[in-house]
């Protein structure tokens, strides 16, 4: 599934963006849908030696080598399992040098697409913890958004690719 969306302006000049939401453990996360290239099922990647355990390996996606990162393991949220229900979101990210990189992120499930008033994003608390008590890496969080009764953690997907080992994979 390929997802594209456009940023729109309301009559009050507040920017609206579409966000793809997904779950990791019991928490709801989101990322800008414009960064989503496609959503696919799990396929076992080719392992790479000497990388952190949350890098599951690489896959060949139409001639492009795509590193696969398990966000459940990266954020120490849940014990990862890999089966027919495992979902990989293929996203386009930007490196500091303004180069685009495609990576796959493993999540528990994809939830929905929401239109978000970007003016309603709240900063993440400095001592943010997951529901399981683990500390959250603040560098990956753009902010928090309330969706009804639930809180969504908006990810800054670009910071995930700043790890030096990823710079050598493409």
Image: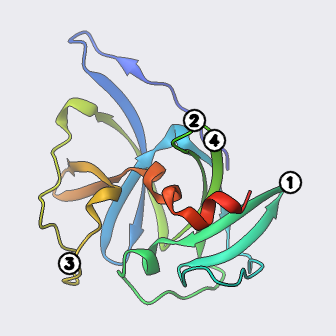
Front label number (3 vs 2): 2
Among the two numbered marks 3 and 4 on one chain, the one whose residue lies closer to the N terminus? 4
- Of the numbered discs 3 and 1, the one sitting upstream in the chain is 1
Residue 5 got which mark? none
Camera-nearest residue between 2 and 49: 49
Which residue is rendered at x = 68% and y = 69% of the image? 41
Residue placed under numbered mark 1 in the picture: 62
Residues packed near mark 1 inside 10 Å, few (<14), some (14 to 19) or many (20 plus): few
Front of the two marks 4 and 1: 4
Tell me the element at label 4. strand
Q: Is residue 93 visible?
A: yes
> Residue 39 or 73: which is nearer the viewer?
73
- Marks 1 and 2 sit apart, C-alpha to C-alpha, by 23 Å
Task: Answer whether labels 3 and 4 touch (C-beta < 8 Å).
Answer: no
The residue where tag 4 is placed is 100
Q: Residues within 10 Å of mark 3 (few under 14, many from 20)?
A: few
**Residue, disc 3:** 131
Circle 2 sits on which residue? 98
């Amino acid at each position: 599934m390929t997802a594209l969306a456009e940023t729109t302006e309301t009559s009050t000049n507040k920017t609206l963006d579409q966000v793809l939401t997904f779950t990791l453990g019991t928490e709801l996360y989101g990322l800008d849908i414009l960064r989503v290239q496609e959503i696919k099922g799990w396929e076992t990647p080719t392992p790479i030696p000497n990388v952190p355990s949350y890098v599951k390996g690489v896959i060949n996606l139409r001639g492009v080598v795509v590193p696969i990162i398990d966000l459940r393991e990266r954020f120490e949220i849940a014990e990862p399992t890999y089966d027919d229900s495992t979902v990989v979101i293929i996203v386009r990210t930007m490196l500091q040098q303004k180069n685009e990189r495609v990576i796959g992120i493993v999540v528990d499930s994809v939830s929905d697409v929401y239109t978000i008033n970007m003016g309603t994003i709240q900063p993440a608390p400095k001592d943010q913890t997951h529901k399981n008590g683990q500390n959250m890496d603040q560098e990956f969080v753009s902010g928090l958004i309330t969706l009804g009764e639930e809180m969504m953690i908006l990810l800054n997907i670009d910071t995930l690719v700043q790890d030096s080992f990823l710079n050598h994979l493409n």
